[in-house]
Image (spheres, helix red, strand yellow):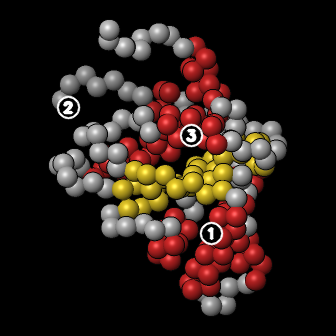
Amino acid sequence: MIDLYQGQSPETLDLLLRRRSTSAKAMGEPGPDAGQLRQILIAASRVPDHGKLFPWRFLVIEGDARAALGEVLAEALAARNATVSESLKRFERGRFLRAPVVIAVISSLKTEKPIPEWEQHLSAGAVCQTLLIAAAAAGFGANWLTEWCAYDDIVMHALGLGEGEKVAGFVYVGTATAPLEERDRPELGDIVSNWTGPQ
């Protein structure tokens, strides 16, 4: 029997129409437990992936590891600017403490098949977006961020990134501690047109 998912899911469409990012600054406990986190990660790994390469991986940062990575950020900041203030270093030490769980999505290019790099990066981006949707479906707030630390060599080394790897995003997951704010959305008329043939 062929398993083709063809059923309607109004709940999913409703979730997509209502989904909003939760500010990392307005996130707290509880975060997903081990079972919920596993389900969220499994859902995120089902994204389109030309060539079935899995050109991405996850680094889950929780518990004391969040503070340990914050120390790396403070050191990296000081390496960039020897006169950086203690208050800014203190802020960086707390960056990953803003949420109970942070998932680093690592874009990991594969070369065994001739799949364009751009398509592999897009797949990693799809993972980040699907994490947001899966977290929302599980009842949590989430936020996809990069910030300076995603591009810093010291941080990337501490995270164990290898050749051809980049941080596609840090996805913060927790419980919203403040009402979610709506933001402006594009008017479809401004972003949609019909292609009718060569110009």
Q: What residue would you read off at disc 2?
A: 199
Asked if residue 23 can be seen in this view, the reply is yes
| Location of mark 3 (residue) | 38
Q: Residues within 10 Å of mark 3 (few under 14, many from 20)?
A: few
Q: Dot 1 corresponds to which residue?
A: 69
| Mark 2 crowd level (few <14, some 14–19, many ≥20, 10 Å Cα) | few
Residue mark closest to the camera, 1 vs 2 = 1
Circles 3 and 1: CB distance less than 8 Å?
A: no
Q: Is residue 139 left or right of residue 165?
A: right
Evaluate if marks 2 and 3 touch, with contact meaning CB atoms under 8 Å apart: no
Residue type pointed to by label 3: Arg
Judged by depth in the image, the label closer to the viewer, 3 or 1, is: 3
Which sits in the foreground, 86 or 43? 43
Q: Amino acid at mark 2?
A: Gln
Q: Which residue corresponds to the image point at 61% horizontal and 41% vertical from the top-left?
A: 37
Question: Which image quadrant: the N terminus?
Answer: top left
Q: Secondary structure at mark 3?
A: helix
Q: Position of residue 157 (x, y in %)?
A: 46, 73
